Each structure stands twice: as C-alpha cells, then as structure tokens.
Amino acid sequence: MTTAEPIVPTNTPPTLAAGQPARDTRAPLPRGGNPLIEGPLIEGIDLTKHYRIAPKRLFERAGSMQALAGVNLAVARGDSIAIVGESGSGKTTLLRLLLGLSMPTSGEVRFDGMVVDAKRDRLLWLRRRAGIVFQDPYSSFNPRRTIGQTVAEPLVATRAPGDHRERVAAILDRMELPSDAPDRYPHEFSGGQRQRIALARALVHNPELLVADEPVSALDVLVRGRLLDLLNELRAEMNLTLITVTHDLGVVPRVADHVAVMQAGRIVETGTVEQIFEAPREAYTQQLITALPRLPRSPRQP
C-alpha cells in the first residue's frame, strides 16, 4: 500500500497520494449561507414528527405516532456531538430530519442559515456539504458496482468537476485499504473494511458535516476501536463537524465533545462528555451510563 497524504482541512486544497495537487471539489460549489454570520452549522428548531399509522380494520380511522416532540438542537462548526438513547428514542428520526431525508411535521432545520426544505428543491446544495455513514454499509452498496464506482457516487451525484479516480484512490488509501480496492467488489471485504469504504464514500467530496449512524455497532471490539480512532483523526484533518448517533455510550468519549440524550422523542439532557459521564442530572441518563458497556477511552489526537 502506498502512503497517501492526509485528507486535508477544508480551507486547504486536497493533496493526492502521488503528491500532485488535486482539484478542490468544494471550491467551485456554491455555499448555502453567509460566512460572516456567526452561528451553528446545523440546527433543529422545535422539531416534531408524526407518522401516520394505517388502520388495521375496515372503517377504522388512521392513527398517528409521535416520533419527535419539540426537539431543539444546535451544533457549532467544528464540534462533535453524540446523540444517544435507547432504540425508539427518536435518534434516527432526528437524524433523517437534519439531513433532509424526511421533513418535520412542524419546526424547521437550518444548515448554515438555510432552511432544509425538500419541497423547495432537491437539496443538492446540502448533499454537497454533508456526508453520512450508515450502520450497515453493505445494504447501501450495489453489489454489481466496484468499490471505486461506489466511493465516487457523491462526486457524481453532486456534479463535482475533475477526474474522480485519483481522489477515490487517495481517500481509500487513507482508509488503510489495499491499493487494488477500487477495482474490487463489496463482497470481497470484511465488515470492518466495508465500514471504511462507507466512510470513504461519505468523505470523498470534502463535506463540512459528517453524520455517523451507529457506525461501529456491528463490529468487534478491536475493529471498532481502530475505526473510532480513524474517525477522530479524520475529524481533525478535515475540520469536520461530526454528529454520531448511537445507543452505546461506550463509544462517545472516543469521538464526541458534547452529548444529547434522547428519550421518547425528546432531548432530556445535554452537556459535555465530562458532564454527562461524571454528573448526569437525569435518572434516565444515569441508567444508560450504568447499564451500557463502554470501550476504554484512548488519548485524543491533537
């Protein structure tokens, strides 16, 4: 495997493994907000979400389920926040709203000051500025497409200019994958390697925001530990704002600075990692900390 230059911060043109300057895929893309305005990169304001429940019997009225109830969340530029809670607490629903994959019943999401509204446009501008890693990347891979084609998907979807092959090769190398990875297929890789491929796909277009949805829950302890360290390294290298969604508080100290605890569609407690782990106020948070296993905390990267 060749040694690639690190994926660089967003205010510096990226460098490829061969040492040749790459075309900055972000530079020609329009930005959504006013860089002179101070404020969070992304925020949810009074978010509620109801899902319709189809009637089970003839002539029975349709019902509804409330997944979110008045959620407010603001994430500063460069911050790393973990959204935690048990299954069914509303984490995934909140994630989908923040990324524009679903629209709130009421309230709004703002990214860099712009309202995220899928009814108004296709949200191409948001796709250019955000990336996501799912819990099970294999289900989101097309088994008939090579890894190179898969990782290049965001570049194609956001109409990024330039030759994508070098950029794809560089970021796969940064993910510590074999040099022939671009020409191989998803089934040829282990679970940990597939998650690295998913991370490469999420970052290949130099996003400002990365959302990781249960990124290590399906991996064994050793593999997940290295992946969390890699995620933390990339956050520093690329000046990322990071949102990690997890039910396991054990991964939180490895990647997050702040925590939002969700229960029954509400955020019941927020604070720094130290505040939440050392002096949780809510009984629910205390139960989570007591009950859930933790990974050993590793030193932070500078």
Image (spheres, rainbow, N blue to C red):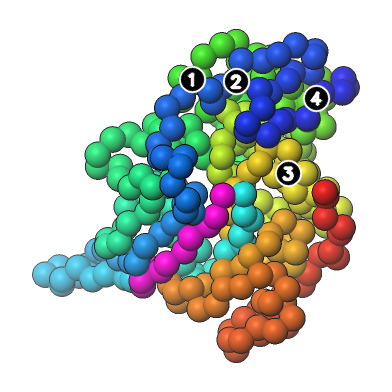
Find the magenta span and give its range. Answer: 67-77
Q: Position of residue 266 (x, y in %)?
A: 44, 74
Q: Residue at x 37, y 62 (%)?
A: 45
Q: Main secondary structure of the magenta part?
A: strand
Badge number at residue 126:
none
Q: Residue at x 66, y 41 (%)?
A: 239
Q: Are dots 3 and 2 in contact, CB under 8 Å?
A: no
Q: Which residue is mark 3?
A: 236
Q: Residues within 10 Å of mark 2 (few under 14, many from 20)?
A: many
Q: Residues within 10 Å of mark 4 (few under 14, many from 20)?
A: some
The reply, left or right, for residue 299 in relation to residue 250 is: right
Q: Position of residue 245 (x, y in %)?
A: 59, 59
Q: Which residue is mark 2?
A: 24
Query: How much space separates mark 2 and mark 4, taking CA atoms?
Result: 15 Å
Q: Earlier in the sequence, mark 1 or mark 3?
A: 1
Q: Which residue is mark 1?
A: 28
Q: Residue at x 52, y 40 (%)?
A: 130
Q: Earlier in the sequence, mark 4 or mark 3?
A: 4
Query: How much space separates mark 3 and mark 2, taking CA atoms?
Result: 18 Å
* Circle 2: residue type: Asp
Q: Is residue 254 visible?
A: yes
Q: Which residue is mark 4?
A: 5
Query: How much space separates mark 2 and mark 1, taking CA atoms?
Result: 8 Å
Q: Are dots 2 and 1 in contact, CB under 8 Å?
A: yes
